[in-house]
Amino acid sequence: MSYGILSEARIANVSQRYVVCLYALSTNDTLGANFNQMQPAVRSCGADLPPRPDPGLGNAVTGYQNDRGPKDPFSPQPGLVSGTGSGHVPGVVQAAVSEPSAPQSGSNNWGDEDGAPPYRPMTYGALDLGTNNCRLLLAKPSRRGFMVVDAFSRIIRLGEGVSQSGRLSDAAMNRTIDALKVCAAKLARSGTTRARCVATEACRAAQNGEEFLERVKRELGLKIEVLSRESEASLAVAGCATLIDFRSDYVLVFDIGGGSSELVWLDLTGTQIDDDGNSRQPIEKSIAAWTSLPTGVVTLAEKFGGKHVTAEIFEAMVAHVEGLIRPFENMHRFRQRVSSADVHMLGTSGTVTTVAGIYLKLPRYDRSRVDGCWLNVPDVRNVTMRLVNHSYDERVAEPCIGPERADLVLAGCAILEAILRTWPSERLRVADRGLREGILTTLMTEDGVYRSSRRRRNGGNGRR
């Protein structure tokens, strides 16, 4: 994976004052060749190139596509995260030169005729330390949402064994420290101006969670806060809000995590939408009810087993999760409320992106094909049943699963199936975005530099 650089002709046509060097996905070029070839053209326009990545940091500026590590196929691609992400043409990353958002009133960031420097947007960071993954996203505000400039993700299984012992293990903490060292280096190297680092269920549940985060602060200088379940649910919604079809009556947003699963029902029946399909009110105003289930792919797989899962074990998993959902449904009666309404589901998790990748028969995971795509629920269930009938080795051989997730994928599918049985729906939208994007959106909105834009995927389903 490497830098994707704009052509010389394209650069030459951009006014010197507003040149933006944008690093987008380019799978056909080598890093060094791209970098060295384009330096003269870019600098001839008066723009500066960022420093080349340090090989010791592990693809320091590769962006979204490889942000989950070389062995993990579940990784998004770099570029412009805007609106729905549904304007993606299959195989093409929607990333282009984007003029920075206008500065706030009274500022001089655009420069003037006296030679003031051009506007340079700040870099924002979001770090999500989860039960299964450690993820970092760095981005700059753009005219349409934000542009990812660097990303990282590694499977660390921090919550491994917590459901049995109640504590983070030494091995899991050491794996996590190694991943956080990379994150700390990237944050320092990028000159990040504002960042938020959060930890979720593993650190919430473990007796030594706070102690571990103190160690992280002491050794790495990273201050990581333990996120409440309510904040986690809210940020997950904010991160994928632009994928919501606001013409629907109700939407269930769910995030199947490693140690917990967040469910958020949105009531859109009174929502006013503009000509672009955006809600005229903050998405938080549409939250009708939410819950956080005390189970995720890691904890469920530890309870029932993840490698060798029979149809009977899978059904037991589903029944267990249905039991966890039942008190929430009994309290709010959404099954009855949505029975004759226009409903869609929006899933933001490795489970739904995996199911989408398999359904699309991708030879390798491709975020531009998955993020924002629509799936019919019968097709989702067909993929699930196919995986239930697979052996562990056959799941490992699936290009969108691999050895690091083969023992967790059926636990995720069981949680998904429990959700679908509780609240029948015809369609599911897939989000390869979530908590990190929600953090970035929130930080940029607070600073007044975030602009939302919705673009629909060609051929995508609208409201039925």
Image: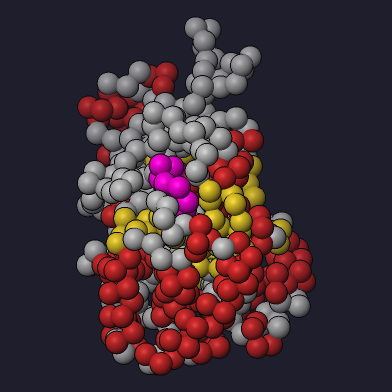
**With 264 as the anchor, is 15 left or right in this view?**
left
202 w.r.t. 344: above or below = below
* Viewer-nearest residue: 433 or 330: 330
- Colouring chosen for the image of the structure: secondary structure
99 w.r.t. 288: above or below = above
Q: Residue at x 58, y 74 (%)?
A: 326
* Viewer-nearest residue: 3 or 457: 457
For the image, the number of numbered tags is: 0
Q: In which quadrant is the N terminus drawn? A: bottom left
Q: Quadrant of residue 208?
A: bottom right
Highlighted magenta segment, given as a residue range: 242-251
Q: Is residue 137 visible?
A: no
Q: Residue at x 35, y 31 (%)?
A: 97
Residue 145's x, y, as percent?
46, 37
Residue farthest along the top direction in this orientation:
113
426 w.r.t. 398: above or below = above
**With 6 as the anchor, is 133 left or right in this view?**
right
Question: What's the magenta bit mostly, secondary-structure-wise?
Answer: loop
Q: Quadrant of residue 39?
A: top left
**With 226 as the anchor, is 35 left or right in this view?**
left
Q: Is residue 35 magenta?
A: no
* Viewer-nearest residue: 85 or 317: 317
89 w.r.t. 261: above or below = above
